[in-house]
Amino acid sequence: MAVAATAGMLRTLHRMHRQLADLAEQLLAGPRAVTARNRQVQAAEGKKAAAAEDVKRARMAADQKQLQLKSSETKLRDLTAKLNACKTNREYQTLGDQIAADTMATKVLEDEILEALERIDTLKPAVPAADAEIAAAKKLLAEAEARVTAETGRLEAEVARIRADLEVAEKDLADDVREKYDRVVKQKGADGMAPIEGHSCGGCFQQLTGNMVSDLMMGRVIPCRSCGRLLYMPDSAPAA
Ligand SMILES: [Zn+2]
C-alpha cells in the first residue's frame, strides 16, 4: 500500500505546487500587461508634446520673419521718401540701387514667410493624430485594468482553494517523508519534486543508479543526488 500511496501523494502534491506556481505567474502577468499599456499611453503623450512643440517652433520662426518684413518695409518707405530729396544724380543713383536691392530682399523674405506658413499647416495635423493615438492607448489601458481586476479575483480564489487542498493532502504524508518534503518545498517550491523519466531525474535529467530506481519502486522517498528534488514514480495511467 505504501508504494503506490507515497508515489501518488507526491504526484498529487507536486501537481498542486505546479498549479500554485502557474497561478503566481499569472498573477504577475496581469500587472505587467497594465504596465505595458501604461507605457503606450505615455509614449503617445510624448508624441503629442513633440508635435505641439514642432508647431510652436514653426510659428515662432514665421512670426520672426514677419517682424523682419515689417521693419524692411518701413526702411524701404523711408528710402523712397529720401529719393525725392536727392540733390545729385549720383546720390539718386546710389539710393535707387539700394532700394532695388532692398526690394529684392523683401521679396525673398515674403517667399520665406509663405514657406514658413505652409510648414505650420503641414505640421499641425500631427497634434490631433497624436490625440487619437492617446485616446486609443487609454482605451486599451482601461480594458487591461478591468480584465486584470476581474482575473485577479478569480486567480486569488483559485490559489486559496488549492492551498487549502494542499494543506489537507500534506497531512497524509508519513512524518519522515513530511520532514524531507517540507525542507525541499521551502527551498525550491514547485521545483522540489520530480517524477523519474526512464532512469533519470525528470527535473535535471541526471541518470539514476539501479539502486535508486529499486528504492523508488519499493516506495521509498529519495532525493535526486544532483538537484535534490524528491523523486517519485510517474503515473502509468494517463493523467486526467
Ligand atoms: Zn535531479
Image: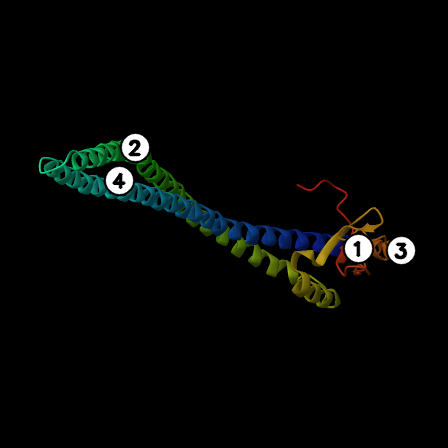
**Mark found first going from the N terminus, 4 or 3:** 4
* Residue matched to label 3: 209
Q: Identify the element where label 2 is drawn.
A: helix
Q: Identify the element where label 1 is drawn.
A: helix
Label 4 to label 1: alpha-carbon separation: 88 Å
Ligand 1 in which quarter: bottom right
Above/below status of 96 relative to 177: above
Q: Which residue sits at x=76%, y=61%?
A: 228
**Mark found first going from the N terminus, 2 or 1:** 1
Q: Position of residue 186 (x, y in %)?
A: 66, 65
Label 4 to label 2: alpha-carbon separation: 9 Å
Mark 3 is on which residue type? Thr
Label 4 to label 3: alpha-carbon separation: 85 Å
* Residue matched to label 4: 62
Q: Identify the element where label 3 is drawn.
A: loop
Q: Identify the element where label 4 is drawn.
A: helix
Mark 2 is on which residue type? Glu
Q: Position of residue 204 (x, y in %)?
A: 77, 53
Label 4 with label 3: CB-CB less than 8 Å:
no
Q: Which label is found at residue 115?
A: 2
Mark 4 is on which residue type? Ala
Above/below status of 115 relative to 198: above
Above/below status of 234 relative to 168: above
**Mark found first going from the N terminus, 1 or 3:** 1
Q: Quadrant of the N terminus?
A: bottom right
Observer able to see residue 51: yes
Label 2 to label 1: alpha-carbon separation: 88 Å
Q: Which label is found at residue 3?
A: 1
Is 76 in front, or is 169? 76
Q: Is mark 2 within 8 Å of ligand 1?
A: no
Q: Position of residue 65 (x, y in %)?
A: 25, 41
